[in-house]
Amino acid sequence: MPGLDDFKPFLVLGLALGGVFAMNGVGLVVLYRATGVLNLAYGAIATTGALISWSLLGGVNQWIAYAACVVFGGVVTLAYGLVFGPPFAPRDPLVKATATIGLLLILLGVMLWVWPPSTTRTYILPTRLHYYEVADVRVNWTQILGMIFPIVVTAGTAVFLRVTKVGTAMRALANDREITAMLGVPVRRVEAAAWLGSGIVCGFSGVLLGDLVGLDIVGVTFLVIPALAAALIGRLHSLWVTLAAGFVIGIVQSCLTAFTRVHIGTRPLADYRTITPFVLAILALLFFARRRPLVRT
Amino acid sequence: MRRSLLGIVAVSGLLLAACGDDDDGGADTAPDEAEAPDETVAPVSGSGSNIQAAGECGAGTGEEATGEPIKIGAMATNSPVADFTWITGMTAAYFECVNDNGGINGRPIEYIAEEEQVDPQQIAAVATKLVEQDQVLGIVGSTSLIECSVNREYYAEQGYYLIIAGVSQDCFTSPNFSAVNMGPYYSSLGGAQAALRAGAEGRIVVASPNQPGFDLINQGVVDFAEENGLEGVSILEDPPFADPAGFAQRLVQEAGDGGGVVLDYTGPNAVPLLQAIEQQGLVDSVIWASSTPPNDPSVAEALGPAWNDKFLINAEFNVLDSGEPDQEHMNAIREEYAPDINLSSFAQMGYLAGRVATDALLGIEGDITKESVNEAFRNIKNFVSDIWCQPWYFESGVGANVSNNVDLTVAPRDGQMVQLEECFEIAELPGNNLEEIRQAEEEGGLNTGEG
């Protein structure tokens, strides 16, 4: 069993990792609440934006290159929402979610074609070069931003939904799209705002992920999975629970890394740490089902 | 109900994804203080009979080959874990150059290079297609994570002798395969030898992708560590790393103060990990070493000066800017025929496979048939190239071929890969057959550079 000292670095690194999961999870929930769409292409949009940004580095001012990732996230997500949002609006959430897999596969194909994975790519933000020592671990400013950014986004979104007209309209849409439309709310415009906002958050996460995780196309694209687990624990509704779940998943997953001498079968427990999001999501769903059992009507 | 259904689908997606996703020291010994290996081997100089003159390929006539094509096949892994298509790509580039220079006695080589995604059924099907549908006369440049294990019996039944770049140990334990490289088992072992010479003590950790056969590959380093009074630790962790900083911390914790870590990942997968190691200030915590794949100038460019001489890469081939004739020849062909392929050890593997195969094909007297092509491949010996430490041969005669078993150590320095150690012999262990093979080499004069 590892001692407390063994956990220290992983606690700190887990917070940074959890920030990434939380950031994506909150982005997923915001869009789902406003449009009913679970955007499974979230990671692919972030990765494509980061790769565009990487391609621009060296050719243009670095801040323009980073901004390109954010702009790409916003534009592509908005475009998808404008084109496919209305026809899919009356459909089941399952159909809407499945449709986003189409976007994911298109972006994945484009990325593998334009940026072959066999090429070594480096994407280092200036924030990585400045760091603090915490519990024998160097925490750089990208990691700190990765922890702060989801909290700011969550708080900002919560305030936005509560105090602005568009936010109120989004909450109404989340309750009942048809009644909201009958009340004269410009539904398409409100949904477009949700798509754009979610895409911009996605673009920001692309910039941070490029630095935190690297530019591996498949790896970053499928980081949406732990974020999805966080969103599920938040029941695709609560921004704050999603935020907390993201951090918990990151911390648990990271701390399991220290269990190198505890074995399950022939493999150390540390080797199983990547299943953390799935285990926690299943436990949360079972817990919710127990509290509010499904009633067959 | 809708939300519940969506939740079930999302969890199912998570589970599916889970199925596809199986992980302050005191070692401040500067690797540039690494001792010279005990057993060094004089490298080949660029003057042997097989060294290609500048601007020539194959027969070197300068005329395009127009006769009936000679079909040669290959398959390479192209998956998120590993992409070996640079190797077949470089072999294809060399064959293109051969075809522009008279081909094989006027006949062009038609190179059919397939890709696979580490699926045994697909790999078996591709081999059947190459052999029975395309009716290739020989197989050259194949590089796959598991193909040797899947198809070794099939190729033996069909009478094929393949010139490959080997990965799994099955590529090095069959008389039907001979690799231009030494593969991750021997290369990781070479990395561990370099780490030990650089002062690694206590534990040596070896980390490889969690793919079939890699436990056996790691076992070589574990055995070597134990032979030398150290503890060996094997870690299987699939790239890409979701948390490179956490994995870096784990490696250092496992190795302990002053230990050694041998990585077995391709350059694009290793770089984020190496950058996280640097960012975490762990470069000097242990001795870092690696098998061949990161011997790639783009890796050196991606690493900061903190890594100067501190990442000991076992290089199965000479450095890419050696200036020696064969290396320059390869660089020129790559630039002309395959500029998209990075200058790398993978490119060297593809080039060498094409070179030795072409030489054998040009030496065939009489009809070029499946039998004569494979017989010519089997008979290759003493093939000299300055890219290898020692001349290359196909068949050792002991039922297993490790024709490249002497290599060197390189390291990144100021954005370039530089040679750090002279050519040295990969360690003979009870778990490998190098002792028997070296004895056969000596008795058969297989790699003396003569004859």
Image: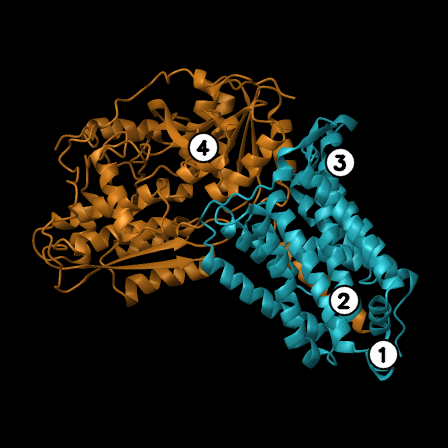
Q: Is the residue at mark 1 from the same chain as the one at mark 3? A: yes
Q: Chain of mark 1?
A: A
Chain ID, cyan in image: A
Q: Secondary structure at mark 2?
A: helix
Comes first in the chain, label 1 or label 3: 3
The shade of chain B is orange
Q: CA distance from mark 4 to mark 3?
A: 32 Å
- Residue B428 x/y as whole percent: 38, 25
Comes first in the chain, label 1 or label 2: 2
Question: What residue sits right under mark 2 in the picture?
Answer: A32
Q: Chain of mark 4?
A: B
Q: Based on the displayed image, in which of its 4 quarters is residue A11 positioned?
A: top right
Q: CA distance from mark 2 to mark 4?
A: 48 Å
Tell me the kind of residue under disc 1. Thr
Quadrant where the N terminus of chain B sits is: bottom right
- Residue A106 x/y as whole percent: 54, 67
Q: Which of A122 and B317 lies nearest the eye of the viewer?
A: A122
Q: CA distance from mark 1 to mark 3?
A: 45 Å
Question: What residue sits right under mark 4 in the picture?
Answer: B188
Tell me the kind of residue under disc 4. Ser
**Is any atom of residue B352 visible in this view?**
no
Q: Chain of mark 3?
A: A
Question: What residue sits right under mark 1 in the picture?
Answer: A180
Tell me the kind of residue under disc 3. Leu
Q: CA distance from mark 2 to mark 3?
A: 30 Å
Name the disc covering residue A11, or none: 3
